């Protein structure tokens, strides 16, 4: 058998390609894998514009790129199959013409596949076009899957690495023609045929752009869609009945295509459309045995039970109550500690009006939602009970790069709890996350960017991800291993972390006072209090003054941050420090008793003027705020704090 010269063949189906095609080409040009070790096969599906000529011009300038053309098939299945048949690489990767690959994607994926002898690699995928970050699939790296769970099969896109010999051996191809859910069908065949599957999470490989007007998503033919859904199930049904692999694969199909349509969105459909869905779901139910329900969250378990009982009126009532349900997220404290940004927060499950969702205790010691009798009639307590969900749920905290949407899980600990809330029981969680920018990207440093912070409560059935609100950040500035790091509150009131001074500066955030300035003959040192130090940092910049620029350094000295100005002493007030191309706010123009972030230091005259009893009460209230009883106490504390600071 001849040796395989190419490691990867990237197969791209193209049809009337948009301008974003240039982004894909640029990402292929930038691959760290040498050009002679991969190829990109573009198959034009009979484009009606100038796409074919455009592809041929691009290929003429690139040794790794080839172009094929076929008569229009109307869907991506056939062009992908044509590209696979022409592929010469050991592995095949399917890319869309409006997405792109990260620079080291092909090299890292193929090395991971070879090292672990894999047939299928699930690479970390970044999504733009959806609001919720942090796919659970990428929470950990799995060299080879040994236990099939919903996390393993969470991502059903075709943007994966497949060993070509494996595809050929099992005759795995995409369905051709105008077939919906072609990705489901292809992956169902692949997953059913192998146990050699790995999850590569330590590097973002692919950016998937979700557009409302994707050409293959236009239009929807009801019967064809559900016929294609039924066809995609067939490989899964060949697996041993009752096996964990079969059950979790069926569960993925059941949750994502049936139960999700019975959630809050169900009540927004017209009555005619709901009736069509009711009939279709009743037809499909035999594919999903009742034993799957034990693997569902309480919310989905109740929906499934009502569906199996044919109680569509109850499902409509439940959907109306579920619409707009969300997590109300708040932080109670954000500060740098031992090189990490420590984020303490809490969240409560609330309805669309912002009122905590009510739960009640059952006679058997369980806990379930307080729902109307027409919903709960005949529903066993075990179906609606959330105690098991509370015990197994761990809050997730995720950070997302605002520039390219790459997200990473943040190490966190916490608990889900219930407490009395205005005569009922509320459910929420508390958490503490430790974000170390040097290691947060799967053991490597986060890139210079603005990072937004999100949280969610998985396993409860209401898993929408929301940005973390913050009232203030008291000590948000840090010099962190050679760069500036500033945690801050955005204008809409959310927590963000600026690394590398993209939008904030350490000097401007620290706002030094006149007492912090020490003038010498050849230098002026300005101590920046309230700046956290982690590792060694020295940055070169300058100070913009009324008489010109002065060279400056921003550096860590032990546990202190110092802004050093070179040259004879001069006026500092009103000048601006410039580092990494970012100008600070004018120095020493804010009132010394009220720093720029609105928090009076305990050593300031503003703090000294407070009655001691008021400070004692405030300290005691803050201690209470950390208790699981949570929301009520915290709201009271916030109101008391505002009054003590004179804010109405």
Image (cartoon, rainbow, N blue to C red):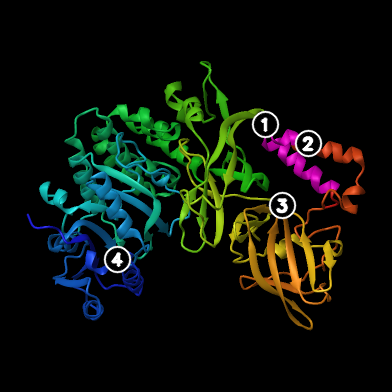
Q: Quadrant of residue 556?
A: bottom right
Residue annotated with mark 2: 621
* Residue 329 placement, left or right of 80: right
* Residue 233 placement, left or right of 481: left
Q: Position of residue 107 (x, y in %)?
A: 31, 59
CA distance for labels 1 and 3: 37 Å
Residue annotated with mark 4: 215
Residue annotated with mark 1: 629
Q: Position of residue 159 (x, y in %)?
A: 29, 56
* Sooner in the amino-acid sequence: mark 1 or mark 4: 4
Q: Nearer the viewer, mark 1 or mark 2?
A: 2
* Sooner in the amino-acid sequence: mark 1 or mark 3: 3
* For the residues bearing labels 4 and 2, Cβ distance under 8 angstroms: no
Q: What residue span does the magenta drawing correspond to?
A: 623-644
* Residue 465 placement, left or right of 189: right
Front residue of 283/17: it is: 17
Residue annotated with mark 3: 559
Q: Nearer the viewer, mark 4 or mark 3?
A: 3
Q: Nearer the viewer, mark 2 or mark 3?
A: 3
* Sooner in the amino-acid sequence: mark 4 or mark 3: 4
- Is residue 316 among what the camera can see? yes
| Neighbour tally class for label 2: few under 14, some 14-19, many 20 plus, Cα within 10 Å | some
Q: Secondary structure at mark 4?
A: helix
Q: Is residue 630 magenta?
A: yes
Q: Vertically, is 378 above or below 435?
A: above
CA distance for labels 2 and 3: 31 Å
- Is residue 181 among what the camera can see? no
Where's the N terminus, which quadrant?
Answer: bottom left
């Amino acid at each position: 058998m001849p040796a395989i010269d190419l490691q990867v063949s990237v197969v791209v189906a193209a049809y009337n390609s948009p301008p974003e095609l240039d982004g894909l080409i640029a990402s292929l040009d930038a691959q760290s894998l040498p050009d002679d070790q991969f190829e990109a096969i573009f198959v034009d599906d009979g484009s009606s514009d100038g796409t074919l000529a455009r592809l041929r011009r691009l290929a003429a300038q690139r040794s790794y790129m080839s172009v094929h053309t076929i008569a229009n098939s109307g869907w991506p299945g056939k062009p992908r199959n044509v590209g696979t048949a022409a592929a010469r690489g050991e592995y095949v990767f399917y890319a869309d013409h409006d997405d792109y690959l990260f620079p080291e994607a092909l090299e890292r994926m193929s090395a991971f596949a070879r090292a672990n002898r894999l047939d299928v690699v699930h690479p970390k995928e970044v999504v733009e076009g959806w609001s919720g970050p942090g796919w659970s699939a990428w929470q950990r790296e799995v060299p080879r899957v040994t236990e099939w769970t919903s996390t393993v099969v969470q991502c059903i896109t075709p943007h994966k690495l497949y060993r070509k010999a494996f595809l050929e051996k099992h005759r795995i191809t995409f369905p051709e023609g105008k077939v919906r859910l072609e990705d489901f069908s292809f992956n169902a065949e692949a997953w059913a045929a192998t146990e050699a599957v790995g999850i590569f999470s330590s590097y973002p490989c692919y950016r998937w752009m979700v557009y409302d007007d994707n050409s293959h998503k236009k239009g929807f033919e009801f019967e064809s869609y559900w016929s294609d859904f039924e066809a995609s199930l067939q490989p899964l049904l060949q697996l041993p009945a009752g096996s964990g692999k079969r059950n979790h694969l069926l569960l993925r199909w059941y949750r994502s295509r049936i139960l999700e349509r019975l959630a809050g969105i169900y009540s927004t459909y017209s009555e005619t459309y709901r009736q069509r869905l009711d009939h279709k779901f009743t037809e499909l139910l035999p594919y999903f045995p009742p034993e799957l329900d034990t693997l569902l969250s309480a919310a989905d378990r109740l929906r499934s039970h009502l569906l199996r009982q044919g109680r569509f009126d109850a499902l409509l009532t439940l959907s109306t109550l579920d619409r707009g349900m969300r997590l109300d997220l708040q932080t109670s404290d954000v500060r740098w500690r031992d090189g990490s940004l420590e984020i303490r927060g809490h969240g409560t499950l609330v309805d669309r009006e912002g009122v905590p969702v009510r739960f009640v205790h059952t006679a058997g010691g369980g806990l379930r939602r307080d729902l109307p009798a027409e919903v709960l009639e005949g529903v066993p307590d075990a179906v609606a009970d959330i105690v098991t969900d509370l015990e197994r749920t761990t809050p997730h905290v995720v950070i997302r790069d605002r520039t390219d949407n790459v997200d990473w899980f943040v190490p966190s600990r916490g608990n889900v709890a219930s407490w009395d809330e205005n005569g009922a029981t509320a459910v929420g969680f508390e958490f503490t996350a430790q974000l170390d920018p040097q290691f947060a990207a799967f053991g490597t440093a986060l890139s210079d960017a603005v990072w937004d912070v999100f949280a969610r409560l998985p396993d409860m059935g209401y898993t929408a991800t929301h940005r973390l609100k913050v009232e203030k950040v008291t000590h948000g500035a840090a010099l962190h291993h050679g760069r500036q790091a500033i945690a801050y509150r955005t204008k809409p009131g959310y927590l963000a972390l600026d690394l590398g001074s993209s939008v904030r500066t350490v000097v401007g955030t620290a706002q030094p006072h006149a007492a912090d300035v020490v003038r010498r003959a050849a230098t002026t040192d300005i101590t920046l209090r309230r700046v956290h130090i982690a590792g060694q940092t020295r940055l070169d910049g300058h100070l913009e003054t009324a008489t010109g620029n002065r060279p400056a350094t921003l550096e860590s000295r032990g546990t202190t941050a110092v802004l050093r100005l070179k040259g004879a002493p001069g006026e500092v007030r009103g000048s601006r420090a410039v580092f990494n191309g970012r100008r600070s706010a004018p120095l020493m123009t804010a009132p010394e008793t009220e720093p720029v972030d609105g928090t009076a230091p305990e050593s300031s005259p503003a703090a000294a003027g407070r009655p001691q009893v008021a400070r004692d009460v405030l300290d005691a209230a803050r201690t209470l705020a950390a208790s699981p009883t949570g929301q009520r106490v915290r709201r009271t504390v916030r109101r008391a704090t505002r009054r003590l600071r004179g804010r109405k």
